Image (cartoon, grey):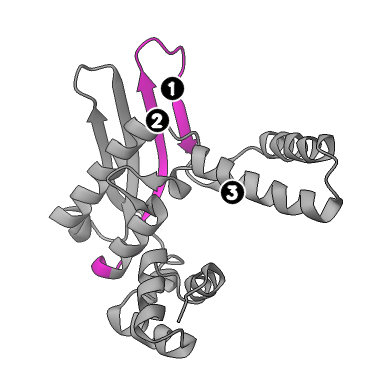
């Protein structure tokens, strides 16, 4: 049976599991949505979505300097307990996220962090491009949605393909860690410095 992108999307929204894990679950159960959900629940992946609501105030301020010293990153990755923050798995996750930021140059942590005026300007630009091509409104809507998703994957950390494995996003990476560690994990903010820039690229809240 062919597993469609819509089926994967539906399962991911229902469970909070990573895209590849959802696809695997559906393939192993011939597209049966309920059996796939049960499979993910058994693997502990479905709990990640629920844990995302829990408070995460412990964690680590991770730093990364690219060889040669031309790029530096500071990122705050949070978890629920100091115990987990000190584990090798969490430390590795924080390091990998910092390394990713150094290479991928995101501007924001997630979509919610994009200033409203910036997002509206992007939408307007994409709509104008569609109208300039003489496309009907219903086609323009789909074009804008596709272009926005591509834009989010370029500028939002959580939507970028992970530099060590472009089959998953950074969000998928964090979701998997939540499922394995059994605690909520979130990236709160980051700053990326590059030699010669006048200001740092920052993402997230400035508390």
Question: Tag count in the figure?
Answer: 3
Identity of the residue drawn at 20% across and 17% down: 68
- Residue under label 2, please give it: 191
Vertical placement of residue 44 versus 115, above or below: below
Select label 3 or label 2 by which is in front: 3
**Residue in the image at 31% along x and 64% along y:** 176
Q: How crowded is mark 3: few (under 14 residues within 10 Å), some or many (20 or more)?
A: few
Of the pair 113 and 71, the residue shown nearer to us: 71
Closer to the eye: label 1 or 3: 3
Above or below, 177 relative to 119: below
Q: Give the range drawn in magenta.
A: 180-207
Q: Can you say whether 140 is above or below 61 in the image?
A: below
Give the mark nearest the N terminus, 1 or 3: 3
Instruction: Assess whether residue 205 is covered by the magenta stretch.
Output: yes
Residue 93 at x, y percent in the picture? 25, 50
Dividing the image into 4 quarters, which one contains the N terminus?
bottom left
**Lower sequence index among marks 1 and 2:** 2
Mark 1 closeness class: few <14, some 14–19, many ≥20 residues within 10 Å: some
Q: Is residue 184 left or right of residue 85?
A: right
Q: Position of residue 172 (x, y in %)?
A: 38, 58
Assess whether mark 2 and mark 3 are in contact (beta carbons under 8 angstroms).
Answer: no
Q: Which residue is tagged 1?
A: 200
Q: How far apart are marks 3 and 2 (CA)?
A: 23 Å
Q: Residue 149 carries which label?
A: 3
Marks 1 & 2, CB-CB < 8 Å contact: yes
Task: Give the CA separation, mark 1 to mark 2.
Answer: 6 Å
Res 182 seen here: no
Q: Where is residue 32 in the image (x, y as percent from the top left)?
A: 46, 88
At mark 1, the secondary structure is loop
């Amino acid at each position: 049976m062919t597993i469609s992108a819509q089926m994967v999307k539906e399962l991911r929204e229902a469970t909070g599991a990573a895209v590849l894990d959802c696809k695997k679950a559906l393939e192993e159960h011939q597209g049966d949505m309920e059996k796939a959900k049960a499979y993910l629940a058994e693997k502990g992946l479905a709990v990640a979505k629920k844990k995302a609501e829990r408070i995460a105030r412990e964690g680590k301020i991770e730093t990364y300097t690219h060889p040669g010293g031309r790029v530096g990153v500071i990122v705050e990755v949070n978890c629920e307990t100091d115990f987990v923050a000190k584990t090798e798995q969490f430390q590795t996750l924080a390091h990998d996220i910092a390394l990713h930021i150094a290479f991928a140059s995101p501007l924001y942590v997630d979509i919610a962090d994009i200033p409203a005026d910036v997002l509206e300007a992007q939408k307007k630009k994409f709509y104008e491009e569609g109208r300039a091509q003489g496309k009907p409104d219903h086609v323009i809507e789909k074009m804008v949605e596709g272009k926005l998703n591509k834009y989010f994957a370029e500028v939002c950390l959580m939507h970028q393909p992970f530099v060590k494995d472009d089959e998953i996003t950074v969000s998928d990476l964090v979701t998997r860690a939540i499922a394995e560690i059994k605690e909520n994990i979130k990236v709160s903010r980051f700053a990326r410095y590059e030699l010669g820039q006048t200001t740092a690229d920052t993402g997230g809240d400035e508390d």
